[in-house]
Amino acid sequence: MVAVRKNSLVTGVLLAAGGGRRLGGRPKALLSHRGRPLIEHAVRSLRDGGCDRIVVVLGAAADEVRARSVLTGCAVTVNPRWEQGMGTSLRAGLAALTDTRAQAALVLLVDQPDIGAEAVSRVRTAHTSRASLVAAAYDGKRGHPVLLGAEHWAGVAEAADGDQGARAYLREHRAGLTLVECGDVARPYDIDTPEDLRHLADPGTQGG
């Protein structure tokens, strides 16, 4: 586990609503990795990376995900519009931070199992204020996790569309974006297709 100093002003936001359409309709949150659902690995990455407050956004098979996963200590919100794309889940996650003490949201995707606590910690510790805008980089290319200071939330929510999430907003504000290289501690692959299941430790038991 990465030894880090926690900061309650940065809340982890885990986007875990996807239905796995290209995986035969198996919710990504429940794909098995090292004997446990992917969602639990992502929550651990956020927590061990220094986020002591975590919002989990569910969507596809939300009741089943709750029943089959250990999400102790997380605030769970359900996005009823999850089928319209990741942008709706990002908006739901940011909305859940309204009226909290959070100064920034650190956004992680559930289907990137090799992005762990070290990458989360590096991005989180780059937070300096409500105006912070930070992203992990892999060989200089922007990726996840992404840290969004509270001053950006309204703009991000307005720009989020379909599966784009914060991409358009970050591109528009790239002059103020801090990139934190994480390529030495993480790999940013997604679990999107049956071929991608090879990245998981126990691909023969997916969703089972």
Image (cartoon, rainbow, N blue to C red):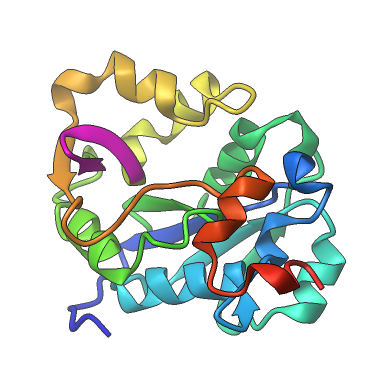
Quadrant placement of the N terminus = bottom left
Whether residue 141 is situated above or below residue 26 in the rendered picture: above
- Dividing the picture into quadrants, the one containing residue 171 is top left
Residue sitting at the far top: 172
Picture layout, residue 132 above or below residue 183: above
Q: Answer whether residue 194 is magenta in the image.
A: no
Q: Residue at x 69, y 50 (%)?
A: 17
Q: Position of residue 13 (x, y in %)?
A: 48, 56
What residue do we see at 81% from left, 79% from top?
Answer: 67
Q: Does residue 176 lie above or below 109 as drawn?
A: above
Q: Give the residue at x 39% y 71%.
A: 45
Which residue is pictured at 61% across the width and 74% down the height?
A: 202
Residue 19 seen in the current view: no
Magenta residues, as a range?
Answer: 135-144
187 sits left or right of 159 in the view: left
> In the image, 4: left or right of 21?
left
Relative to 157, is 45 on the left or the right?
left
| Quadrant containing the C terminus in the rendered view | bottom right
For the stretch drawn in magenta, the main secondary structure is: strand
x and y, in percent, of residue 98 in the image: 52, 49
Q: Is residue 154 visible?
A: yes
Q: Position of residue 26 (x, y in %)?
A: 80, 55
Give the side of residue 16 with respect to residue 178, left or right: right
Who is closer to the viewer here, 50 or 180?
180
